[in-house]
Image (cartoon, rainbow, N blue to C red):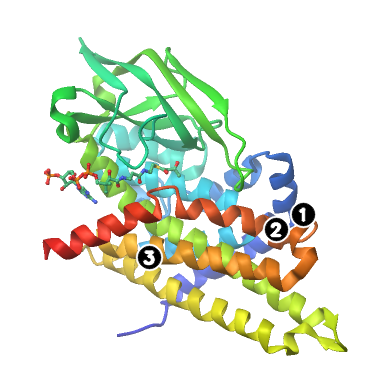
């Protein structure tokens, strides 16, 4: 077993860190406060190759492995969790299914734009009444000549306010439940496609979480992804990779919280010495460091399993479950280390506290991750 990164992985990590520290971190609080997505920075991420990291060079991607990708997501999320999820959705939830299940024509049409950040993508699975029970889709797609006519409402769609294309899931045969779900690539300019209300979220405020309304939205048959009735497999296998990305995002947030805590513990004086001299503070820092390392190792294992071409459903679920819970503990302790100042928006600990929570919810709640892990155990 080798725990060392390759030279290339270290270079990608370094490049992501440099960009995140120099360009993203200085404006993260501003974007959080104004809820404005940092689209100029996202486009730059595209120019640097961070928006289609695992897509082969032939389609405009960086052709890198999953390990490199999650290292980059951690660095970006450490600076700004909103930018981290914008990047992760584009890579994991949009480029991946198009590259894996798309026709040659779909790959040629969409991947070069998505990988460069000329277009951005979103993933539309959830509905107002359909979250964890993802197979319970109410959006319908009815075949009409050379198109499917989509009707329904999607919600909690990350990137939805600015995305150009959407991977949308709909029922083509309601009688068949999971086998009756089909995926489509829907362009935002398609008549009948509308972006609805933008949600006011607790954290990741500079991301865009919206409702999507489909009203007699005619999507060409050529935009079906993964075949009729193959949508649930597309959805689940895509989320497997997405969950590794969210785990990396959680680690980035936790690391930022820990680093802020260490800095503060060295500066803040109480009872005549820096508070870092007190065991109460030291134990919190030690727990953060240990748990973050453990979460990163689980996440790297999930990524390496994917890179090895093996099934990684369980590994991804374990990584996301653990990393998101580690992030929650780290941000809670970070606020505590900062005392009253941790409760103020003037210090980044407050933003990390709000940002961490979503990692326990989206791309499958912690309860869903436990379900997936248990199902894997019981199948063996
Ligand atoms: N890969 C490939 N196929 C898979 C799969 C996977 N990981 N998981 C399940 N399948 C297949 C199964 O093999 C099965 O097919 P067969 O019948 O041919 O064997 C079929 O799918 C049905 O599987 P299940 O019986 O396990 O399905 P279920 O209805 O019981 O669902 C679940 C299980 C794990 C709870 C699933 O519904 C789930 O993951 N729910 C959570 C949904 C989720 O994560 N939503 C997040 C929304 S997206 C988001 O948050 C993105 C964002 O904007 C940031």
* Element type at mark 1: loop
- Can you tell which mark lies on residue 331? none
Q: Quadrant of residue 281?
A: bottom right
Q: Nearer the viewer, residue 307 or 247?
A: 247
- Relative height, residue 281 to residue 77 (above, below): below
Task: Indicate which label's residue lies in the foreground, 3 or 2.
Answer: 2
Side of 92 relative to 145 (left or right): right
* Element type at mark 3: helix
Disc 3 or 2, which lies upstream in sequence? 3
How far separated are the C-alphas under marks 1 and 2? 6 Å
Residue 345 x %, y %: 77, 54
Disc 1 or 2, which lies upstream in sequence? 1
The C terminus - image quarter = bottom left
Task: Name the residue tied to disc 1.
Answer: 345
User: Residue at left 31%, top 53%?
Assistant: 240
Q: Nearer the viewer, residue 13 or 358?
A: 358
How far separated are the C-alphas under marks 3 and 2? 25 Å
User: Residue at left 47%, top 35%?
Assistant: 157
Residue 180 x %, y %: 17, 29
CB atoms at circles 1 and 2 under 8 Å apart?
A: yes
Q: Quadrant of residue 253?
A: bottom right
Residue 1 x %, y %: 30, 85
Mark 2, other Cα within 10 Å: few <14 / some 14–19 / many ≥20? many
- Can you tell which mark lies on residue 319? 3
């Amino acid at each position: 077993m080798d725990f060392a990164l390759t030279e290339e992985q270290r270079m990608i990590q370094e490049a992501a860190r440099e960009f995140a520290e120099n360009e993203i971190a200085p404006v993260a609080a501003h974007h959080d406060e104004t809820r404005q997505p940092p689209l100029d920075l996202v486009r730059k991420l595209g120019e640097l190759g961070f928006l289609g990291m695992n897509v082969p060079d032939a389609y405009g991607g960086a052709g890198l492995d999953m390990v490199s990708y999650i290292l980059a997501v951690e660095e970006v999320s450490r600076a700004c969790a909103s930018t981290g999820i914008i990047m992760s959705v584009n890579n994991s939830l949009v480029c991946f299914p198009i590259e894996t299940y798309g026709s040659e024509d779909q790959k040629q049409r969409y991947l070069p734009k998505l990988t460069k950040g000329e277009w951005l993508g979103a993933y539309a699975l959830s509905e107002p009444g359909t979250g964890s029970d993802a197979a319970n889709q109410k959006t319908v797609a009815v075949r009409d000549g050379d198109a499917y006519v989509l009707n329904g409402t999607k919600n909690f769609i990350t990137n939805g306010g600015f995305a150009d294309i959407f991977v949308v899931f709909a029922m083509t045969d309601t009688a068949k439940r999971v086998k009756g779900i089909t995926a489509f690539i829907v362009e935002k300019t398609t008549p009948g496609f509308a972006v609805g209300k933008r949600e006011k979220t607790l954290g990741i405020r500079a991301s865009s979480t919206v409702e999507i309304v489909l009203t007699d939205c005619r999507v060409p048959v050529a935009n079906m992804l993964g075949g009729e009735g193959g949508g649930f497999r597309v959805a689940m296998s895509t989320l497997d990779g997405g969950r590794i990305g969210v785990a990396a995002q959680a680690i980035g947030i936790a690391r930022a919280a820990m680093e802020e805590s260490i800095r503060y513990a060295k500066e803040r004086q109480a009872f005549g010495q820096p508070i870092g001299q007190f065991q109460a503070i030291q134990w919190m820092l030690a727990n953060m460091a240990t748990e973050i390392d453990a979460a990163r190792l689980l996440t790297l294992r999930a990524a390496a399993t994917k890179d090895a071409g093996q099934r990684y459903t369980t590994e991804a679920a374990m990584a996301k479950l653990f990393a998101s819970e580690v992030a929650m503990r780290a941000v809670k302790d970070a606020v505590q280390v900062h005392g009253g100042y941790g409760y103020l928006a003037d210090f980044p600990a407050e933003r990390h506290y709000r940002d961490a929570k979503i990692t326990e919810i989206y791309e499958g709640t912690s309860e869903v991750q436990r379900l997936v892990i248990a199902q894997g155990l019981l199948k063996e």
